[in-house]
Image (cartoon, rainbow, N blue to C red):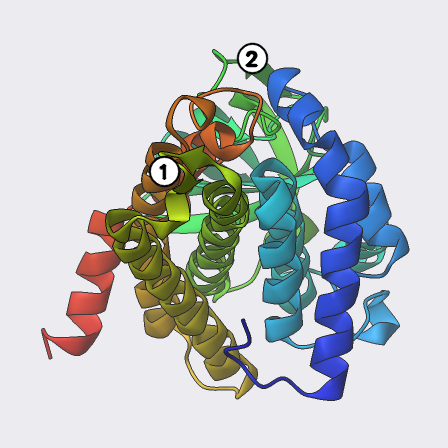
Amino acid sequence: MKTFVLTEDQSMLRELAQNLAEAEIKPRSEHVDQGCVVPAEGMSVLAEAGLLSCVLPEDQGGAGLDCWSQCCVIEETAKQCASTAWAVSENAVVAECVCRYGSETSKSQVLPSLVEGVFAAVADGAGLTCEKAGDGYVLSGRLRHVLLAEAAKWLVVSAQEGEERLWFLLENGQDGLKVEKQAELLGLKGCPAGTLCLENCRAASDALLGGGVEKTLRTLRALYGAAIAAGISQGALAEAIPYANQRIQFGKPVSHFENNQQLLSDLLAKAEAARALTWNAAAVKDSGEDGEVVAEMAKVFAADVAPYLTRKCVQVMGGYGYSREYPVERKMRDAKMIELLGGTAEDLKAEVAKALVMQ
C-alpha cells in the first residue's frame, strides 16, 4: 500500500535500507534478542552501505544526507530489530552532537569511528557532578540505566556543576570510568543496560561540548525514538496481516471476520499516522526550523501507538503471537521500552504544553 510520494533518491535510499534490513538484520534479530547480544554485525552492514550517521557532511566522513534519510534508515531497521535501530539512533545522535558542538580534536577522533560502526551512547540524568580542575574537569557519581553502556566506545554524559548542567564526551574505559552490569531488560535486549560509575574521572577541556547540545539531544532522541516506534508498528503488522490471511478458522481466513477487519484497519491507520508525524518532524528539521516540538509530538503519538498495536497483533495471532516462533512478542516487548526511552510521554507532553499552551 502506497501512502507517500517520494522522490527518486528517497525511494532508492528507502529500498536500500529495506533490503539490507530484510536480508542482513532480520536473520540476526532473534539471536540478538535471546542472547542479549549487541548488534555489531548489523551495525557493520549499515556502515558498509554508508547509512550510519549519514547526516554528517562528507568532509566529516558522512554521506551528507538529510534528517529524513536517517529517520528512514532507523525506521526500516526497527521493522526487523529494534535493538539494532536503537544502536543506530544513538550512533547518529552522538555523531551530530560532536559535529555541531565538539572541539576539532573530538571531531577528528570520534566521527570517523562512528561512521565505521562504533557504538555510542547518551547518558542523561541526575547522578553525576563535575567541578573545574586546572584546564579540565573532574566528574564523579553514578548513572544507572544507560543502554549500551558497556559496548559504547564513546559516551555523551551530563554532569551538574552547581546550577549549571554541562555535557562531556568521554571514552569508555578511560581512567576513573567503569561500567557495572545491570539486570537483563524486558525489551531491547540487544542493548544491555549498565551503570556508569565515575570516580575522579578527568575530562580535558576539549571534551566539553558547547552550548545547545541539550536541545539538540532532546530533538533528535524524540525524532529517532518516533522512527523506531513507527518501524516496530509496521513490522508487527507485516507479521499479523499475512498470518490473518492464511490462518483458517471455521472454513475461512480469520482476516475475513468483521471484527478482525475492523481491528486491522484501525491499526493500519494508526501505523500510517505515526509514520506521517515522524516524517513531517524530519522534514521540519531539514527545513532549518526549530523541530523540537513537532519531534516531541511525533514521539508521543508513535510511542503510544506501538505498544497498543503490538498487543493487538499478538491478539490477532492468538497463541502463536505470544510464542517465540513469531517475532511479534519481541516487538511488543521492544515497543514498551521505546515508550519509556528518549523522553517519557509525560515529560514530552509537558514540553509540548510549554511551547504551545503556556505562552
Residue beneath disc 2: 181
Q: Position of residue 141 (x, y in %)?
A: 45, 23
Q: Residue at x 46, y 56 (%)?
A: 230
Q: Residue furthest front?
A: 251
Q: Nearer the viewer, residue 114 or 9?
A: 9
* Classed neighbour count for the residue bearing mark 1: other residues with Cα under 10 Å, few (<14), some (14–19), many (≥20): many
> In terms of sequence position, does the residue under pointer 1 or pointer 2 come before the other?
2
Q: Give the camera-side residue of 108 and 263.
A: 263
Q: CA distance from mark 1 to mark 2?
A: 37 Å
**Could you tell me which secondary element the residue under label 2 belongs to?**
strand
Q: In the rendered view of the protein, which quadrant contains the N terminus?
A: bottom right
What residue is shown at x 81% (from left), y 67% (from top)? 62
Q: Can you identify the residue that label 1 sits on?
A: 316
Q: Is residue 295 above or below residue 261?
A: below
At 75% from the left and 34% from the top, the residue drawn is 27
The picture places residue 170, in percent across and down from the top left corner, at: 65, 39
